[in-house]
Image: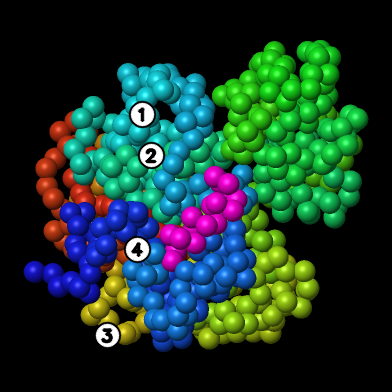
Amino acid sequence: MTALPCPNMFLDMSGHWGILVSDPLLQNQFTQVELRSLKTQFMSMRRENGRLIIGDLASKMSRLKVIGDNLNEEERASYIQDLYQNTDEEVDFELFLKVYLKLQTFASSRTGSTAKNSSAFLKAATTTLLHTISESEKSSYVAHINNYLGEDEFLKKYLPIDPSTNDLFEIAKDGVLLCKLINVAVPGTIDERAINTKRLLNPWERNENHTLCLNSAKAIGCTVVNIGTQDFIEGRRHLVLGLISQIIKIQLLADLNLRKTPQLVELVSDSKDMEELMSLSPEKILLRWMNFHLKKTCYKKIVTNFSSDVKDAEAYAHLLNVLAPEFTNPSTLVVKNPFERAKLVLEHADKMGCKRYLTARDIVEGSPNLNLAFVAHIFQHRNGLPTRTKQSSLLETLPDDNQDSREERAFCLWINSFGNSTYINNVIEDVRNGWVLLETLDKVSPGIVNWKIANKPPIKMPFKKVENCNQVVKIGKQLKFSLVNVAGNDIVQGYKKLILAYLWQLMRYNILQLLKNLRFHSHGKEITDVDILQWANSKVSSSRSQSRMDSFRDKSLSDGIFFLELLSSVQPRAVNWSLVTKGVTDQEKKMNATYIISIARKLGCSIFLLPEDITEVNQKMILTLTASVMYWFLKHPHEERIIGTSDSESGSQMETISNSTLDDSASDSSAEDNGNV
């Protein structure tokens, strides 16, 4: 019988340690994923000083998203002082939860129903504990799903979904719809051969789909830190809708970059502006595009958000007049009532062919998610930028889509997967103040950061950024990274090769530590690249295969066969060999690579590589793939990996309990819980 790690924990049916809270009302306020997240944060705070008292909470709770983003330290301290007179009282976990809930309710009451920067719902949509959903948003997302997936061969028997019901959450319970939606947002992310699509799925097959969905969502940039497979099974509406909103947003903003839409170069005047534009998030680029066109009108305001600044619909009226003057209605700018103006704006958009899923009420109420989606759809349909640009010479400064840029993408997604307070879009630009790197270091090695000397954004003084980055370098040396002649100012200056080298060493350290912690028989021995290589060859050899990997740069790996055999050796029914190609042509190699990535994610591996990383044998990404499979294997006892009934319809799917804590990790869990490589 398995011993409990501590008295207030239990082992649930999926093999996770659950957390028990003695107060049932308090227990019902949180999912197990949220409790694990908060427990990790609580333990981290307590370790820093050896104990945690009421007086510490005002400063330390700044790390918790809704509280830290919407209340300053003085406001938190004043509120806590009103609640608890004895600030020297020691805080246990249940008191920590009570204070957290009260502060969160206070923060929400201060900001209205949504948190600060709510338009950036890549970061916040799935992390609130206020378990409410917007019926208007639900209707909009249902319409989007009906439009894009209505003809899907498998889903068409369930679509269209009636937005007035909760059918969306019932259909989402088997994971197929969300996997398909991810592929609409970023085509090719999931190899659909890996999705379990029988009409009736058993619990293990549904769980595999959920695991594949969550790991693939992370791989396209969604924040899924507070969502676990159990949330899909239980149909937790706020979490499911939050994930759907992120996926749809990624789809709608996909063209807001210079590579996809080179005409955006019209928004800049010189190379310096070009660098700034490349560092902006898609939302910021969309705002800049909107203001670019508004400057051509008599509208004098600057639109800075997709909520309060567009509630009167005036900016929309001017924007659409510029983009589609043939449909201009003079009444739009004459009417005084914002609601009536919003209706005329939508009539204008409808004539353009881009009135999708937004109502006049959504505009005047300032719904940030739906207004952002509306403007993004207008941009997709008619961006009003010339096809031949005068600024074409600036496009020559764009970096090639080579291995470096793919690694930048992987590091960016990996960092975001930890659920840090800042969501990054450009890994080189967004780490230059040092804060995100410090947060990531603290997740990888809890307690290693001295937060007393760290400077939280926004940071106006350059020397404060240098202070943060000096600590980043100091910690790197402490972790035995190769940082010869590297100073904090080098990161502040944005030296690309140095930053990428640091991030690679941090990612590699993360997975090696995870493996070391799991290999109890290693007796503290450091895990090396050679150990991972030997393990992989040993597993493949044990399945009586002749395949072998000589190194992580072995060119024979490009056909994918070795990794398919590795996955098959750790989970005998993971691979449907009838779907595997010989890997001779480039197309066959890519098909195998796509299948490998989806099968690994379906097992529970949190990986951020692309098929090209396998076919071109990118040494770093090959190492992370192998290490991730090894981590999954060591984390699951034999009896959890093989449960045993065959899938008679496909012959390929393993009946497995694979909702590992890799995909269930919560936003503020340690790297060991997070399992990201």
Q: Residue at x 16, y 61 (%)?
A: 638
Separation of disc 4 and disc 3 at Cα? 27 Å
Q: Which mark is residue 166?
A: 1
- Check residue 165 for magenta coloring: no
Separation of disc 1 and disc 4 at Cα? 28 Å
The magenta span reads 99-115
In the picture of the structure, the residue carrying the numbered disc 3 is 523
Foreground of the two, 599 or 466? 466
Q: Residue at x 56, y 40 (%)?
A: 250
Q: Nearer the viewer, mark 3 or mark 2?
A: 2
| Res. 547 visible in picture | no
- Check residue 103 for magenta coloring: yes
Separation of disc 4 and disc 2 at Cα? 20 Å
Q: Amino acid at mark 3?
A: His
Foreground of the two, 283 or 411? 283
Q: Amino acid at mark 1?
A: Asn
Q: Dividing the image into 4 quarters, which one contains the N terminus?
A: bottom left
- Mark nearer the N terminus (1 vs 4): 4
Q: Dividing the image into 4 quarters, which one contains the C terminus?
A: bottom left
Q: How many numbered marks, from 0 up?
A: 4
In the picture of the structure, the residue carrying the numbered disc 4 is 36
Q: Residue at x 82, y 21 (%)?
A: 333
| Res. 275 visible in picture | yes
Mark 3 packing: few (<14 Cα in 10 Å), some, or many (20+)? few
In the picture of the structure, the residue carrying the numbered disc 2 is 237
Mark 4 packing: few (<14 Cα in 10 Å), some, or many (20+)? many
- Mark nearer the N terminus (4 vs 3): 4
Horizontal side of 198 relative to 46 (left or right) equals left
Q: Residue 62, position in %: x, y?
A: 55, 68
